[in-house]
Amino acid sequence: MNQPTAFTPTAAKLVQKYNYPVIYMETKKVARGKYEVTPILLTADPAQLTIKAIITKYTQQLEKYILNYPAGWLWSHRRWK
């Protein structure tokens, strides 16, 4: 979103160490109090990627979600307004 944003590498280090698949959980509001959650596989083999690559895949998917569904994102932080 054209803003430098910090991400902690802890989760990426864990999935890389234990070779767990990286899954982004996309949440969409379908009605008041009702949500639809869609798992999106980012990588099945994180041991083959760098920590930076894992974080980049996640942030790209998050940015795509925010651009497609801006109402679903918490816009309380002035940095993104």
Image (spheres, rainbow, N blue to C red):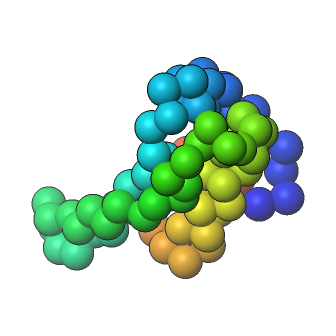
Q: Residue at x 55, y 77 (%)?
A: 68
Instruction: Decide if residue 40 is on the left or right side of residue 8.
Output: left
Q: Residue at x 49, y 53 (%)?
A: 44
Q: Is residue 72 visible?
A: no
Q: Residue at x 68, y 44 (%)?
A: 48
Q: Residue at x 77, y 60 (%)?
A: 1
Q: Measured along the vertical axis of the image, is residue 43 above or below residue 13?
A: below
Which of the image's four quarters has the C terminus? bottom right
Q: Measured along the vertical axis of the image, is residue 66 above or below residue 14?
A: below
**Rendered location of residue 78, percent (x, y):** 70, 45
The answer to which image quadrant residue 50 occupies is top right
Q: Which one is in front, 63 or 12?
A: 12
Q: Measured along the vertical axis of the image, is residue 38 above or below residue 80?
A: below
Count how many numbered circles sit on residues in the image: 0
Instruction: Decide if residue 59 is on the left or right side of residue 34.
Output: right
**Rendered location of residue 79, percent (x, y):** 74, 45
Q: Is residue 18 visible?
A: yes
**Rendered location of residue 70, percent (x, y):** 53, 69
The answer to which image quadrant residue 54 occupies is top right
Q: Which one is in front, 67 or 17?
A: 17
Instruction: Decide if residue 55 is on the left or right side of residue 40.
Output: right
The answer to which image quadrant residue 17 occupies is top right
**Rendered location of residue 13, percent (x, y):** 62, 25
Q: Which one is in front, 80 or 13?
A: 13
